[in-house]
């Protein structure tokens, strides 16, 4: 917290209540002179050995998104790969049958 009455002093409070146990509260005060720390006071002091706490959290690396293409360009590239036709070039017109079936030449007996 920034103390409005003491511009050269910052107060920090730490409170923890692990697993419903009694609350533990610690406090540290930093004293400054010309934006340099000149004193530290309080009951929250660093230990001589590092404290390592295990965590159940998982870090997931997300691949970088390709923002150079629009969604339509990405979707159409999938169809280009599958059917060999670029939907962005020109409209797809299916092949027309070359000959009409003749109704008189029915190979199946009735």
Image (cartoon, rainbow, N blue to C red):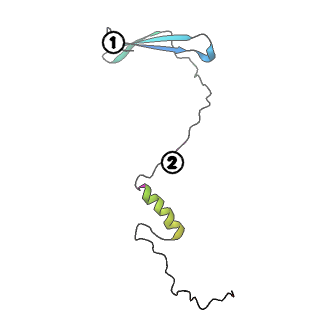
Judging by the rendered image, the residue that carries numbered circle 1 is 8
Residue at the image point whose x is 56% and y is 41% from the top: 60
| Count of numbered circles on the image | 2
Q: Secondary structure at mark 1?
A: loop
Q: Position of residue 6 (x, y in %)?
A: 33, 9
Residue at the image point whose x is 49% and y is 67% from the top: 80
Residue mark closest to the camera, 1 vs 2 = 2
Is 22 above or below relative to 84? above
Q: Secondary structure at mark 2?
A: loop
Is 61 above or below relative to 54? below
107 relative position to 69: left or right: right
Q: Which residues are magenta?
A: 59-70
Does label 1 or label 2 sit earlier along the sequence? 1
18 relative position to 44: left or right: right
Q: Main secondary structure of the magenta part?
A: loop
Is 61 above or below relative to 33? below
Residue at the image point whose x is 52% and y is 17% from the top: 46
Q: Is residue 35 part of the magenta span, yes or no?
A: no
Query: What is the residue that sits farthest to the front in this orientation?
Result: 110
Quadrant in the picture for residue 19: top right
Q: Quadrant of the C terminus?
A: bottom right
Assess disc 1: are there few (<14), some (14-19) or many (≥20) residues with their C-alpha within 10 Å of its C-alpha.
Answer: some
Q: Is residue 68 part of the magenta span, yes or no?
A: yes
Q: Nearer the viewer, residue 46 or 97?
A: 97
Judging by the rendered image, the residue that carries numbered circle 2 is 63
Q: Position of residue 14 (x, y in %)?
A: 50, 15
Residue at the image point whose x is 39% and y is 15% from the top: 1
Disc number placed over residue 99 in the picture, else none: none
């Amino acid at each position: 917290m920034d103390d409005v009455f003491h511009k050269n002093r910052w107060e920090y409070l730490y409170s923890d209540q692990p697993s419903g146990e009694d609350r533990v509260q610690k406090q540290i005060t930093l004293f400054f002179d010309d934006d340099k720390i000149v004193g530290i006071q309080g009951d929250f002091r660093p230990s001589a050995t590092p404290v390592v706490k295990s965590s159940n959290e998982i870090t997931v690396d997300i691949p970088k998104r390709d923002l150079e293409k629009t969604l339509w360009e990405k979707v159409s590239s999938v169809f280009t790969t599958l059917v060999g036709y670029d939907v962005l070039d020109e409209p797809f017109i299916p092949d027309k049958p070359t000959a009409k079936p003749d109704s008189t030449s029915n190979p199946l007996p009735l």
